[in-house]
Amino acid sequence: MAKDVKKTQKTNVKKEEKKIQPKKEIKSTKKVVIEEVVDTKNTTKEVVKKEKKKVTKNKGEKLSSIIKTVDGNRWVILASVVGFLIATLLFRCILWPDRIATLKDGTQPIASFTGETITADELYEKMKEHYSVNVLLNEIDNIILTEKYPDNDEMNTEVSETAEYYFNIYEQSYGYTKEDFLSNYGFASENDFIESLKLDYRRNKYYESYAEGLVTDKQIDKYYKDEVFGDVDSKHILVKIDKDSEDGLSDEEAKKLAKEIISKLNGGKTWDEVVSEYKDQIVNEELGYQAFNASLESSYLEECKKLEVGKYSKTPVLTSYGYHIVYKIDQKDKPSLEDVKDDVVDVLAADIKNDDTDLYYKALIAMRKDAKLEFTDTKLGDEYKEYTNNYK
């Protein structure tokens, strides 16, 4: 459901342009969580939190027991840190200007040993066979997207923070210095790495714009009518479900206690009296005003929407944290469509991305088509056609 989407930048993590068979383009590197790291000479296992775009007017972070942990759609999806770095390494090795000699006709030897030689043409054919579509698409996208999204302060700040994130993660996980990191992944300098991250940033900007462009006026009007409501001020009592700790409550036990608390309220006890009586068994919070697209779990938002001002839940409200009794303190008037249209588009675009996990690739394919991309190399053209067929 759209209201489950938390407004977050994107930043995700990356999708890597498919190397015709399995590899894909890299999505945003900003939101990567590495849970288990093993020797990079073997493999790196990561859990990637999908980057969702912010769609919330959340007023504060004291919502710890309500806010659903999100990063599983604005930046999807995904690929690993090492996958990103390997793809970029190939990009550096094959096309970077200071790594390639200028040859007249490709027949000149570039290496010789024990009477054998390898020519530029031979090396190029091997590279083309294994890597060139990946690398070529990086180069093409970089040219197209740099024109669409020139450098700006926002981009430079986010990319710099992302680079520092990588440096810190690899220092903590492997003991790498910055120089170790750059050297191991084929970057001639920190600036080389920054330029690779900028390509990734620009791809995601285009992806977000593409998804927003798929939202129709009809969808916007319907969502506004059915889902948008005035900001609600609420407080709640939470009985946590905690099966892992010795003194924690099971689902059944937590629900039973929540019902018991509701019965006390029904019996005439005030909210404060109940909170005082059960203070060692519950969490009690006042959340302040929350919008229709706040980063609260949908069941809690639905309860806020349907309750009358001054009323509390008559049955426990289940979230991923446990059972809640919600009290609706106040509600503002419903905002105009003009005031919330951008937020509604964000929510609907996030839904579209959730519904089609291949949309990132489709967006970049559409971008290249708009740029009138054609291949004069028939082998590369056939491989790219095969690649695009995977996303029809």
Image: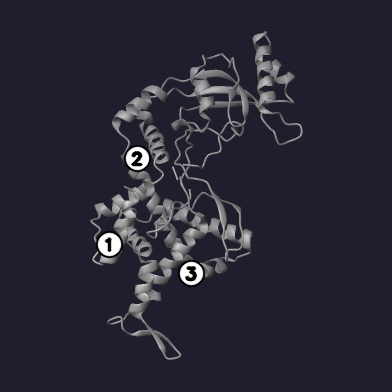
Q: In percent of the image, x 45 and y 39: which residue is there?
A: 54
Q: Position of residue 138 (x, y in %)?
A: 37, 61
Residue 111 visible within the image: yes
Q: Are dots 1 and 2 in contact, CB under 8 Å?
A: no
- Counting residues from the start of the chain, the first of labels 1 and 3 encountered is 3
Label 1 sits on what residue type? Gly
Foreground residue among 261 and 374: 374
**SS at mark 1 in the image:** helix
**Residue at label 1?**
381
Q: Are dots 1 and 3 in contact, CB under 8 Å?
A: no
**SS at mark 3 in the image:** loop
Q: Does residue 50 lie above or below 140 as drawn?
A: above
Q: Is residue 264 left or right of residue 381?
A: right
Q: Position of residue 141 (x, y in %)?
A: 33, 58
Label annotation for residue 243: none
**Residue at label 2?**
212
**Farthest residue toward the bottom?**
115
Foreground residue among 165 and 48: 48
Q: Are dots 2 and 3 in contact, CB under 8 Å?
A: no
Label 3 sits on what residue type? Gly
Label 2 sits on what residue type? Glu
Q: Quadrant of residue 324?
A: top right
Q: Nearer the viewer, mark 1 or mark 2?
A: 1
Q: In percent of the image, x 62 and y 62: which residue is there?
A: 174
Quarter holding the N terminus is top left
**Residue at label 3?**
186
Q: Does residue 170 lie above or below 122 as drawn?
A: above
Q: In percent of the image, x 31 and y 59: which residue is there?
A: 384
Foreground residue among 21 and 244: 21
